[in-house]
Amino acid sequence: MAAPAETTLSSSASDAVASVEMPRAARRDGTIAWVSRITFLVVALAIPLLFKNFVVFQFTQMLVYAIAILGLNLLTGFNGQFSLGHSAFYALGAYTAAIMMDQYSVSYIWTLPAAGVICFVAGFLFGLPALRLEGIYLALATFSLAIATPQILKLSPLEHWTGGVQGIVIIKPDPPPGVPLNQDQWLYYFTLAVGLLLYILARNLVKSRSGRALMAIRDNPIAARSMGVNLALYKSLAFGTSALYTGIAGALGAIIIQFVAPDSFTLVLSIAFLVGLVVGGVGWLPGAIFGGAFVLFVPNIAEGVSKGLSGAVYGIILILLIYLMPTGAAGFVRAVLSRLKS
Amino acid sequence: MSEVPPSTPPLLAVKEVAVRFDGIVALDGISFEIQKGQILGLIGPNGAGKTTLFNCLSRLYTPTSGDILFEGRTILDRPAHRISELGLGRTFQNVALFQHLSVLDNVLVGGHAKSRSDFVSDALRLPATRRGEAAMIREARDLIAYLELSEVADRVVAGLPFGTQKRVELARALASQPKLLLLDEPAGGLNHDEVGGLGRLIQQIRDDRNVTILLVEHHMGLVMSISDNVVALNFGKKIAEGPPALVRQEPELIRAYLGTGA
Ligand SMILES: Nc1ncnc2c1ncn2[C@@H]1O[C@H](COP(=O)(O)OP(=O)(O)OP(=O)(O)O)[C@@H](O)[C@H]1O
Ligand SMILES: [Mg+2]
């Protein structure tokens, strides 16, 4: 496909420039990435040593939300499927942990893989019929999941396990013997470790053949099919994996709060995840931490500004943020980085 | 290329394929064959049914009747996502790239069908996964270089010029190492010089990579200069078939194109 002479000339000129600049730019990008990672780790590791227990607990809760948002991002940001039903998977994970600890005295550590597997299966199975639904219709189907969940948790035939309206109270786990941390500090580090592991796995996934297939479906499902991508399989797997993340977050949430009850898992929670996803940046994995921070702290800040009008203040903060950073923290961070480079 | 011994079974045989969309007969019992190594031009005025036929070949549509044999076996029992693995690749009339992915990632998705992986090993980045990935990236970069796209390999597709995007689609289709490549109006939107280059490129792909080509194109100069055989459609019916020199003199074809400058 011979380009006309002018384009060939100008493009080979820009090629020459690019081939000189690219490696340097790539190296600088790599350096910035490592600097941000190390900064994050140092700050994250220092938090329990700097703050009071309640604040440490809040940061733990923020990490839990971040994990849930990470899961939602895999589904919505990378595979293009909407969900208003992630409160249901969060609840399923939370109740799995609570029931295992309360009724079967299982160690909190083992509740996480169990919650993950159960939610994966639930998400995968929900994803199968949802395959026929696109966009707004899928949002409605997941919406009904969110609406039904608290009511199902209150059903009397299930009360023996779920505790009905009362919910389940569980015991706060102690740090392993010999670890010089209090319970809040330990749970923070434990959650941080789980979160980092899940983040690395998500990052590997989106940069792999499977991840590319997910994004191909998002961008052009018909072309993806013609390239050999099994849409039914990958969309269901995306649903399952997303639910797995959110379910593990739910289990961690139950463990740190030491309590589960039906009304903590309403549609409001699903929407909070969605808001966190948008604030952090759709399709940008590190955005989850910004989203988690927003979900946890902004309602408190709003309450601090005005008790009576906290909802309105929250709304104004949200609108301002979206106005200032239309693509969430993702766009903001990118803008700052390109400022740094020039 | 066209003097294949008659005993060789065709690479593709389209048999009496008909497609009806409520009311419209898009294809009305089309039959033709492609021999290995050929370039077959498929022409016809707008709405003749060319893209509909392509969509049947890639199983996006199911023919109302008729059969499609690839290497002697029907493809109608396969879902669309199991066509690429047979060695049937395609491009789309209106570029259908993954707009938010880089050129490299687009080409890598093109190779999806000839690689294997699963969520668990991909998430864990097991050594085998890493080796497979490295090999796939090497192959994709070779293909990108072959199509002179190296300069934009790591750029996101959205925002690349249309002509470049068409070439990316070609690279993506070649990534599956197809035996038969379906090109739907590859010259659409290209200027005169680019069309000349495209003709040479298509022949080069056929010769270097052993790819048989089914070419849908409105650009008569291009079709007539590189095709071994031409099939002409009009209103879903085959109206002419044969070597370019003969087909261009068919009265029916001239009538079909009357006023459209054939
Ligand atoms: N999915 C569909 N539903 C209904 N009608 C369709 C569909 N796809 C194609 N058609 C109709 O089938 C006929 C053939 O269309 P097709 O796109 O195959 O033509 P074409 O030869 O590719 O034309 P062009 O040269 O304009 O691309 C047209 O009348 C078109 O409107
Ligand atoms: Mg067409």
Image (cartoon, rainbow, N blue to C red):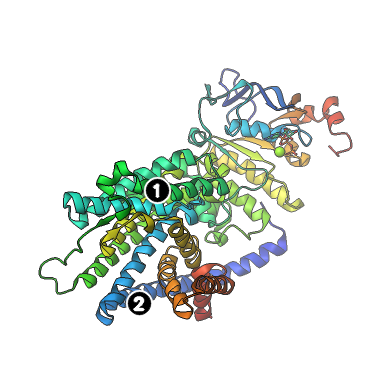
Label 2 marks a residue whose chain is A
Q: Amino acid at mark 1?
A: Gln
Is circle 1 on the same chain as circle 2? Answer: yes
Residue A222 or A170: which is nearer the viewer?
A: A170
Q: Secondary structure at mark 1?
A: helix
Q: Looking at the image, in which quadrant does ligand 2 appear?
A: top right
> Where residue B217 is drawn, which disc sits there?
none
**Image position of A69 with respect to B192: above or below:** below
Label 1 marks a residue whose chain is A
Residue A316 on image: x %, y %: 55, 73
Q: Secondary structure at mark 2?
A: helix
Residue position for label 2: A39
Residue lying at the far left of the rendered structure: A178
**Image position of A289 with respect to B252: above or below:** below
Residue density around tag 1, few if under 14, some if 14–19, many if 20 or more, within 10 Å: some
Report whether the residue tagged 1 is closer than 8 Å to ligand 1: no
Mark 1 vs mark 2: which is more N-terminal? 2
